[in-house]
Image: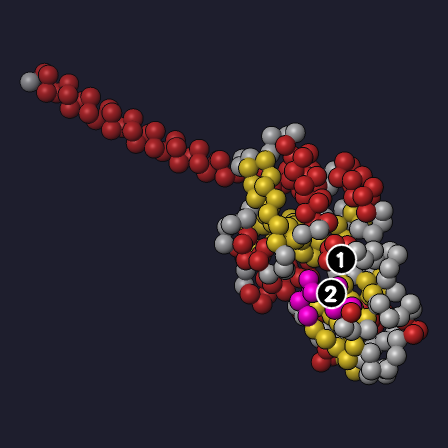
């Protein structure tokens, strides 16, 4: 009888220990999410990827492994982040992110500024804006936020006027004055540099201009000013804003070492926004 009682007590104790151990495992997993030391960061090819590679080197010194995942468009990095295929991304400016959140309902938010990549106007035909002829074809990005950005830049140049002069939601339909009867061609942002052989001028994002051999400081006929609201940002899923590892990655990006790398490598064509 005593032997049976001892067996029952032993079984109960073992079960209790197992439950306790399982509970501890669950708690550790939760803490592991916060202290995650290996993360995937989505970027677009070009400067964003180059800078993030440098950030990854600095992060490795602090025990954080960053896997840099490159994309060739503006759509997939946010989709991949929302679907948890990425932990963070670093490629888009704030107005673009705001538009994605508003239009597509993705639960994403920004957690820190990165760089300003000024949009610029290029031409293989003209050397100045004064030369732009009536009826010229103008390429602008076809996504809403970058399309609006291009139109605001053209308005700054005096080529057009928009219904709401400073709206970051402007579209071609909002053009109220177009004295040179410019013809607008809307393309994926990544394709705008290639359009220069077929159109007269093109508004090109710097991260696509540089890989195409275009320098916004030297080759453009108009470049966006430093006061632009289009600074790029880190994005994470809503609820991850306080993840300690993600916060540390932002701190590393905004360090003096990375600022020096940006200034030395891009010589003022890309600017630290922090």
Say what secondary structure mark 2 lies in.
helix
Splitting the image into 4 quarters, where does residue 153 fall?
A: bottom right
Q: Locate residue 271 relative to residue 248 in the image: left or right.
A: right
Is residue 190 magenta-colored?
yes
Q: Where does residue 213 sit, x and y in percent of width and height? A: 79, 56
Q: Locate residue 186 relative to residue 265 in the image: left or right.
A: left
| Residue located 88% across and 65% down the image | 221
Q: Quadrant of the N terminus?
A: top left
Q: Give the CA distance from mark 1 to mark 2.
A: 8 Å
Q: Where does residue 222 sit, x and y in percent of width and height? A: 87, 64
| Residue located 81% across and 62% down the image | 120
Splitting the image into 4 quarters, where does residue 198 fall?
A: bottom right
Asked if the residue at tag 2 contacts the one at tag 1, i.e. Cβ–Cβ closer than 8 Å, the answer is: yes
Q: Where does residue 183 sit, x and y in percent of width and height? A: 77, 80
| Residue located 21% across and 26% down the image | 12
Is residue 153 magenta-colored?
no
| Residue located 85% across and 47% down the image | 267
N-terminal of the pair, mark 1 or mark 2, is 2
Q: Furthest-left residue in view?
A: 1
Say what secondary structure mark 1 lies in.
helix
Q: Locate residue 129 relative to residue 64 in the image: left or right.
A: right
Local crowd size for mark 1, using a 10 Å CA cut-off: few (<14), some (14–19), many (≥20): some
Local crowd size for mark 2, using a 10 Å CA cut-off: few (<14), some (14–19), many (≥20): some
Q: Which residue is mark 2?
A: 194
Q: Which residue is mark 1?
A: 212
Region rendered in magenta: 187-196
């Amino acid at each position: 009888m005593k032997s049976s009682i001892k067996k029952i007590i032993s079984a109960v104790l073992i079960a209790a220990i197992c439950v306790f151990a399982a509970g501890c495992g669950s708690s550790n997993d939760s803490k592991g999410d916060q202290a995650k030391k290996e993360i995937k960061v989505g970027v677009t090819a070009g400067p964003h990827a180059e800078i993030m590679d440098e950030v990854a080197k600095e992060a490795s010194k602090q025990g954080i492994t960053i896997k840099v995942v490159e994309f060739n468009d503006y759509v997939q990095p946010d989709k991949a982040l929302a679907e948890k295929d990425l932990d963070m991304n670093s490629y888009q400016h704030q107005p673009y992110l705001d538009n994605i959140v508003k239009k597509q309902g993705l639960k994403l938010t920004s957690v820190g500024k990165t760089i300003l990549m000024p949009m610029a106007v290029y031409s293989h035909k003209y050397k100045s804006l004064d030369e732009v002829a009536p009826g010229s074809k103008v390429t602008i990005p076809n996504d809403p936020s970058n399309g609006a950005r291009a139109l605001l830049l053209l308005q700054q140049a005096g080529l057009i006027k928009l219904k709401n002069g400073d709206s970051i939601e402007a579209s071609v339909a909002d053009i109220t004055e177009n004295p040179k009867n410019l013809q607008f061609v809307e393309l994926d942002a990544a394709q705008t540099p290639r359009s220069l052989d077929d159109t007269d001028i093109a508004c090109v994002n710097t991260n696509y201009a540089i890989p195409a051999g275009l320098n916004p400081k030297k080759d453009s006929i108009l470049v966006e000013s430093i006061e632009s609201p289009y600074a790029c940002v880190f994005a994470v899923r809503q609820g991850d804003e306080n993840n300690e590892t993600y916060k540390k990655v932002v701190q590393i990006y905004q360090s003096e070492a990375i600022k020096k790398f940006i200034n030395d490598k891009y010589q003022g064509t890309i600017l630290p926004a922090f």
